[in-house]
Amino acid sequence: MAGFAHRNRRGSGDSDFSHREEDLDLEAGNRETLRRDAERQAALQLERAKYKPVAFAVCTNVEYDGSLDDDSPVHGCAVSFKVKDFLHIKEKYNNDWWIGRLVKEGHDLGFIPSPVKLESLRQQTAKAGKFKQSTSTTNLGALDNMMPRSESRGSTPPTPEDDEYNAKKITNIVTTPPTKEKKKLIFKKQENLPPYDVVPSMRPVVLVGPSLKVTADISLAKRSLLNNPNKRALMERANSRTSNSLAEIQTEIERIFELARSMQLVILDCDTINHPSQLAKTSLAPIHVLQRLIKSRNKSQSRNMNVQMELFDVLLDENQLEDACEHLADFLEAYWRATHP
């Protein structure tokens, strides 16, 4: 009888274990079913968003690589972007993800991390930094191993080699501008730099020129005022007519945003704009077109001009008006295709 009771207890234990296994399998199956349903719904919402208008546009201040650790609602549909890329946002999917696309030819709709999502990535990097100090200054943040893995070591402490691997993985997903670009923002607090800046849905076109020599001509004109006091009154009246209040400037910016919502090209007539830096602090993110009609005369001037060329999107250096117009038309047609997929 004792032997029978012992076998009975062992059989009962085996039965309990098999029940627990079945419960775990059922729970895992339910989770997988829910995940598939959620991904199917997200894919449907992504498809419907193709036929919706652009809600707003942003310019990126960070770099994001969604292919390294894609946890977007639809696997493989995370949108990757570089610093100073432009994104069209169609709608908000949830607090962590927006639906939108990179404004470039051949790029489809996908899921874009929201500022809330990017902030959580930044916090993950901050936590990782407590275990291994990174010498890189380009981190914003990234998602580390949030989900349990089958090869997890449990309570065994990590090795230095594993720490180094994880730190490298984290820094590769989301980064802020490189050190060279940060030098331009040396007087700004980097931690307050938002990941996105809201810009017009269609970047307005600003013609700058006829050359950068205009700024030098203006300084010469101001200097000549000292030698010709009779011209001072005329100059002061002209300045009073062109000076606008902050309220008027804000009204003009809002009007440009409103015009851009129609997804049409907007050309700005800015006869007082002689350099891209004059628009750098605005939220317009315009397409700068330089009409360079005066050629450089020596190596020093050429070197200085090449540095300044980086500030322009289009450089028109053709001698014939027809050629310059064709050059500008080709650029604008490519931009139109990028904004109207």
Image: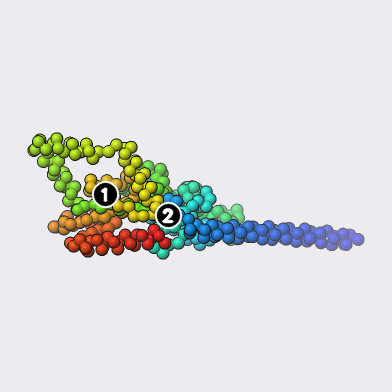
Horizontal side of 145 relative to 247 (left or right) equals right
Image mark for residue 290: none
Report x, y in % for residue 149: 58, 59
Q: Residue at x 34, y 53 (%)?
A: 203
Amino acid type at mark 2: His
Which is more N-terminal, label 1 or label 2? Answer: 2
Residue 195 place in picture, x, y as percent? 42, 49
User: Closer to the observer: label 2 or label 1?
Assistant: 1
Which of these two is toward me, 339 or 313?
A: 339
Residue receiving disc 2: 88
Query: Label 1: which residue?
Result: 269
State the colouring used for the structure image. Answer: rainbow
Quarter residue 147 falls in = bottom right
Alpha-carbon span between mark 2 and mark 1: 25 Å
- Of residues 242 and 75, the one nearer the viewer is 242
Residue 307 shows in this picture: no
Going 50% across and 51% down the picture, which residue do you hit?
A: 92
Q: Is residue 185 left or right of residue 196?
A: left
Identity, as a three-letter code, of the amino acid under mark 1: Asp
Which part of the image, by quadrant, shows the C terminus?
Answer: bottom left
Q: Is residue 222 left or right of residue 164?
A: left
Q: Secondary structure at mark 1?
A: loop
